[in-house]
Image: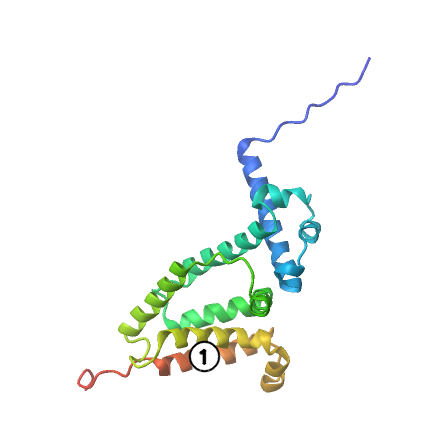
Amino acid sequence: MEPKTTRQRAPEPAERVRDAERTKAKLLDAALTEFAEHGYRGARVGAVADRAGVNKQLVSYYFGGKEGLYRALQRAWLDTERRSAGADVPPGELVRWYLHRNLADPRVARLALWEALSGDVPREETAADTAAEQEAMRERRAHGEFAPDLDTAAVQLALMGMVFAPAVFRDTARRLFGVGIDDPEFETRYGDTLSRILARLAAAPEKGNHP
């Protein structure tokens, strides 16, 4: 008498969706590591799949290839930024959020450096996105968060430089602060100072508003 065979239950649609989302998340995380280490040109799809522990063909299946994967990384960042760094967040909190993100995951800063060095990479952020960012900065200036004589484009670029600086000048930061940038003391000291700098960029209160 032959032994009974147990038929494996086919996954439910919801399970397949969850598996697909987990696979895509693993690929995106692996892609961030690979692109941060080698840049867009030097990164290899096979290496991304190996890091994620999945079949290489899944990169094409889910993202359409290397460029699609890179663009998906950018979209994921833009979505996170829109959720956590909106116009209602005070400047001091905003810069602390960006600083924490860069210190918690240096891959973001490394990827930005690769983009700056290579220049010719796929970009998901559009001219309309940049225009919206600048409009938001001008609104902040109109509300007194920045002094009226400050160029909002210059302010935005300067803020980006300040939050990326620790990851770019890692050894210099250690020499100056006496601790590594992964030490909570560094984030507190540097973040506190950035918040104070932003407070000093705000418009001066109008005379007569205070006794």
Image coordinates of residue 92 in percent, x first then y, are 40, 74
Image coordinates of residue 61 in percent, x first then y, are 60, 41
Left or right: residue 117 versus residue 96 is right
Quarter the N terminus occupies: top right
In-front residue for pair 24/153: 153
Residue at x-position 46% and y-position 82%: 193
- Amino acid type, mark 1: Leu
In-front residue for pair 209/184: 209
Q: Quadrant of residue 3?
A: top right
Looking at this rendering, what residue extends furthest in the right direction? 1
Crowd rating for badge 1 (residues with CA inside 10 Å; few <14, some 14–19, many 20+): many
- Using the image, determine if residue 115 lies above or below residue 162: above
Left or right: residue 133 versus residue 177 is left
Quarter the C terminus occupies: bottom left
Left or right: residue 92 versus residue 177 is left
In-front residue for pair 207/158: 158
Image coordinates of residue 146 in percent, x first then y, are 33, 77
In-front residue for pair 126/8: 126
| Residue 143 visible in the snapshot | no
Q: Quadrant of residue 198?
A: bottom left
Image coordinates of residue 14 in percent, x first then y, are 53, 35
SS assignment at label 1: helix
Residue at x-position 51% and y-position 69%: 100
Left or right: residue 200 versus residue 15 is left
Look at mark 1 in the image and give the residue it sits on.
Answer: 194
Residue at x-position 48% and y-position 56%: 124
